[in-house]
Image: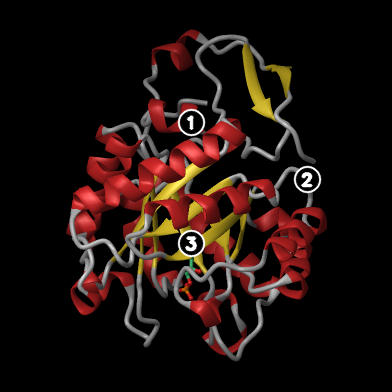
Amino acid sequence: MHGGAHRIMSVPSRTSRELRAPYRRPRAAERMGAPHVNQVIRIPVLGQVDMRRKELMMLLLISPDGVEEALDCAKAAEHLDIVDVKKPDEGSLGANFPWVIREIRDAVPADKPVSATVGDVPYKPGTVAQAALGAVVSGATYIKVGLYGCTTPEQGVEVMRAVVRAVKDHRPEALVVASGYADAHRIGCVNPLALPDIAARAGADAAMLDTAIKDGTRLFDHVPPDSCAEFVRRAHAYGLLAALAGSVKQDDLGPLTRIGTDIVGVRGAVCAGGDRNAGRIQPHLVAAFRAEMDRQAREHAVGTPAVN
Ligand SMILES: O=C[C@H](O)COP(=O)(O)O
């Protein structure tokens, strides 16, 4: 489904207890179409995540490398939240072809948002803005940019401002994700903990970390859980979504849940043999990953006041 129209949905009234309970991350949730404490919510027809169910849960983003794997994602659609189009052989956030984004948009259920990576981009704001426009025109509603070639926060802000303008001029409700790299020290790009500030200054919607070099090292090998918690805290302080990825395994889901991650991005862990290159995405591994996410969410929720 394409276009900018919205449908208006009624939601049941909340009890007084629910009304007293604070939202944990209201501004971030609002960005994803979450209900306010009233009777009406707006959900973009584009396949916005229904945050009524998810507002206290991590969302699962899965990255197929093409149409065939996207169809495998579609088989596991009930277990995932966002289908993320990328081209892993062009880099950690390698950009796929516009026609592949469009085919995948058509192949996955309309209520699943499609995300697209714009690449591990150079410090070239004009080039990157055009690429981002290409992704949103092709049907993606999350636009992810890897600030690979940016060595200072100012360069990152400049690139992301151009992206935000290009994307939102075309589709205001699309979400722009500024991504840095947990292993930035290995490639000489901007410090991972600078990403929330870069995203906020540029008017983006989310700050993300992935790993640049897919050599088996994981997010927490480079940015330990305490530092990831600080990343999430900074993102939320700006009202941004916090997305984390980087060879994340089921074992990492406990800490990721506890620190309040909004979106976890995964490929290798749901591919056969855990191999993001030679393996293919397996629907049963997606289901198993989700089951562990749900288990962690339930465990974490014990003692946490319900808000919905
Ligand atoms: O955006 C998420 C990435 O595709 C993560 O891939 P990975 O789990 O293989 O590192």
Q: Quadrant of residue 210?
A: bottom left
- Residue located beneath label 1 in the image: 31
Q: Earlier in the sequence, mark 3 or mark 2?
A: 2
Q: Secondary structure at mark 1?
A: helix
Q: Which residue is mark 2?
A: 110
Percent across and percent down for residue 239 are: 34, 31
**Callout 2: SS:** loop
Amino acid type for the residue under numbered disc 1: Arg
Mark sitting earlier along the chain (1/3): 1
Residue at label 3? 265
* Residue 81 visible in the displayed image: no
Residue 106 point in image, percent of width and height: 81, 54
Question: As displayed, is residue 169 above or below residue 293?
Answer: above
Rounded to the nearest angstrom, the CA distance separating label 1 from label 2 is 19 Å
Q: Amino acid at mark 3?
A: Gly
Against 76, is 39 above or below?
above
Is 42 located above or below residue 163 in the figure? above
Q: At 70% across and 29% down in the image, what residue appears?
A: 4
For marks 1 and 2 on the same chain, the one whose residue lies earlier in the sequence: 1
